[in-house]
Amino acid sequence: MKILVTVKEVAAVDDEFEIDGLAIDDRYVTADLNEWDEYAVEEAVQIKEAHDDVEVVTVTIGPSETDETIRQALAKGADRAIRVWDDALEDAGLLDPETKAEVLAAVAAEEDPDLVLTGVQSADDGFGATGVTLADKLGMEWGAVVNDLDLDLEGGVASVHRELEGGVEELTDIEIPAVLTIQTGINDPRYASLRGIRQAQSKELAEYGLSDVGLDASEIESPLEQTSLYEPETEGEATVFEGSPEETAAELAELLAEKGVTS
Amino acid sequence: MSVLAIAEHRRGELRPVSIEQLAAGRDLADELGGELHTAVIGGDVEAFGADLNREGVDTVHTVDIGEEFNHDVYTQVVTQLATELDPTVLLMPNSVNGLDYAPAVANRLDRPLVTDVVDIDAEDGLTATRELYGSKTETTIDVHAEQAAVTIRPAEWPTIETDGDAAIEAFDATVDESAVKSTVKGFEEVGGGDIDITDADVLVSVGRGIEEEENLDIIHDLAEALDATVSGSRPLIDNGWLEKDRQVGQSGKVVTPDVYIAIGISGAVQHVAGMKGSDTIVAINTDPNAPIFDIADYGIQDDLFEVVPALTEQFQ
Ligand SMILES: Cc1cc2nc3c(=O)[nH]c(=O)nc-3n(C[C@H](O)[C@H](O)[C@H](O)COP(=O)(O)OP(=O)(O)OC[C@H]3O[C@@H](n4cnc5c(N)ncnc54)[C@H](O)[C@@H]3O)c2cc1C
């Protein structure tokens, strides 16, 4: 059995930052593995550990600078990685869920996985739609926002909990092959061991261009164009207490006392 | 040049976003010079249909198939509705269920999809506003297509209270059962612990800024000094540092205490959904740009590890 996990490097922005055109100035950005993808990788690795003959392959859309982040997934137990990038993707501007799914679907068609795990959303652009778009492109079944997974490989069914709003979960049986978008909290992602980190260095990280996966640049033209990036005007009218921690704490204590909060 | 908004319901109730979408949809329809349609699929479609008949709606389509949400059914039905009505903009909720069918529908209709939209206008082509990097920035997106699919962030548009005089029409959809590959078995309520954070007058709520489980001691000390209850943002619950029923937010509890003290919580939209109704909101956060300050009444922009012990001391 093969599990394909989509992983993405996301940008975390510092507390103070400057915007440079349509992006945050590089100086204020740190790269990290997308939080939701970490849980997806862990889930795949746990399935691998529980069954014989499971291969976990990660797939990423991104430039070579993301290799270090991808190796985190290899260090945590994925078997090999695929990364797709070329000039056409670089020039495509905003990669919308459809465009991303098109590329991922081309890789999935090649790899023919039994299960695809993605994160619910990515922490930076937060579209939350790539996994389900991918499923539909592949003609696979799917489930979005999965926070519990019980695989019955013989029966060909994934019994999942989908986390709805308001502390309610939906219990659903999904035929596999399927794409599941994984929610945080489904498991407890491991730290990479030193041994894992060493091993990751020698694991395969294949680099493909669009033509290698059977696509040409015209197929990845995004219909969405980002036209601005700005800091939203704060609607907030918060009274901000100024001073040393002792001073601000004293002011807050006084306020709380006024509001009737006492020990 | 019309707009079609797909309603959402669960366990016998329309969800509020179904009505909020109508406000967004009416504005868009006005800009496009067209009609606003809305549709409801499954459940008590008669009652839902009547409820969706609000001011500004031209037609309510009821589709009497199934009881609860099933994404395979919704995907097929919404695709048929959109093919038949051919709306310029197809609106769906940016809810957990919305995200479970909207991408598939957009893919089948070959329409671009813009999700989690907080503002949208159709004056000069379609332009959507979204947030990036956890609400620290906003971005505008031009949609270069004649027709689009859009998911609307809950609680961003007003609800329409006034009744309307829409036509209510039954829509006959055909569902290919062989393409229904998922079965909803039921629902489960999460939690059931001893404490009820929705009952508390004062919540000391802690987020990822606390860094380590051991550091929670200072939060518990403060809560004790204030005779308050401890709640938290999702990462703490995911890590197992707090019980599940202490989670505030979209997938946790909605709380409305007299005082909500958010400590080391950024104020992600899913968190805010659970606490914005609190009477007085206090935020303690090192990041002056943290979105929590947008909804806070009082703030301290400083290190929680210094402020929290100092605050506890004030009450001892
Ligand atoms: C479908 C879905 C449902 C979700 N449901 C929920 C939900 O119900 N509830 C929920 O909370 N989240 C929910 N989330 C997750 C949500 O998107 C955020 O990831 C989460 O709320 C972030 O929690 P946080 O603010 O504690 O952490 P972060 O966003 O990491 O923020 C930590 C904050 O701490 C501050 N900080 C760091 N160090 C210090 C210090 N020393 N002193 C003071 N401040 C400091 C930082 O400046 C930052 O603002 C959901 C997400 C999805 C996709």
Image (spheres, helix red, strand yellow):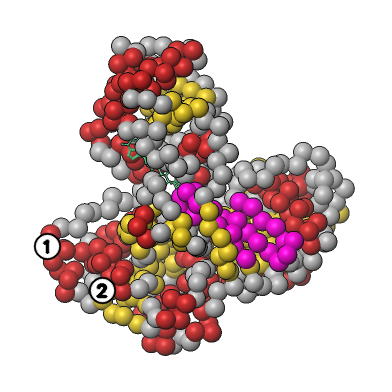
Q: Is residue A260 magenta?
A: no
Q: Which circle's residue, 2 or 1, is located before the other in the chain?
A: 2
| Coordinates of residue B51 in the picture (x, y in percent) | 76, 44
Question: Is residue B187 depicted above or below A3 in this figure?
Answer: above
Label 2 neighbourhood size at 10 Å, few (<14), some (14-19), many (20+)? many
Q: Name the amino acid, label 1.
A: Arg
Q: Which mark is residue B286?
A: none
Question: Is residue A176 depicted above or below B287 in this figure?
Answer: below
| Coordinates of residue B45 in the picture (x, y in percent) | 73, 50
Q: Which residues are magenta?
A: B118-142
The residue closer to the viewer here, A233 or A109, is A233
Dividing the image into 4 quarters, which one contains the C terminus of chain A? Answer: top left
Alpha carbon separation for disc pair 2 and 1? 16 Å
Total number of numbered labels?
2
The residue closer to the viewer here, A219 or B67, is A219
Q: Residue at x 46, y 85 (%)?
A: A215
The residue closer to the viewer here, A256 or A47, is A256
Quadrant of residue B219 in the image?
A: top left
Q: Residue at x 36, y 80 (%)?
A: A111
- Residue under pointer 2: A80
Quadrant of residue A10 in the image?
A: bottom left
Q: Is residue B192 left or right of residue B122?
A: left
Q: Is residue A104 left or right of residue B64?
A: left
Quadrant of residue B204 in the image?
A: top left
Q: Residue at x 50, y 72 (%)?
A: A93
Q: Chain of mark 2?
A: A
Report the image quarter containing ligand 1. Answer: top left
- Residue under pointer 1: A195
Q: Chain of mark 1?
A: A
Q: Residue at x 53, y 84 (%)?
A: A218
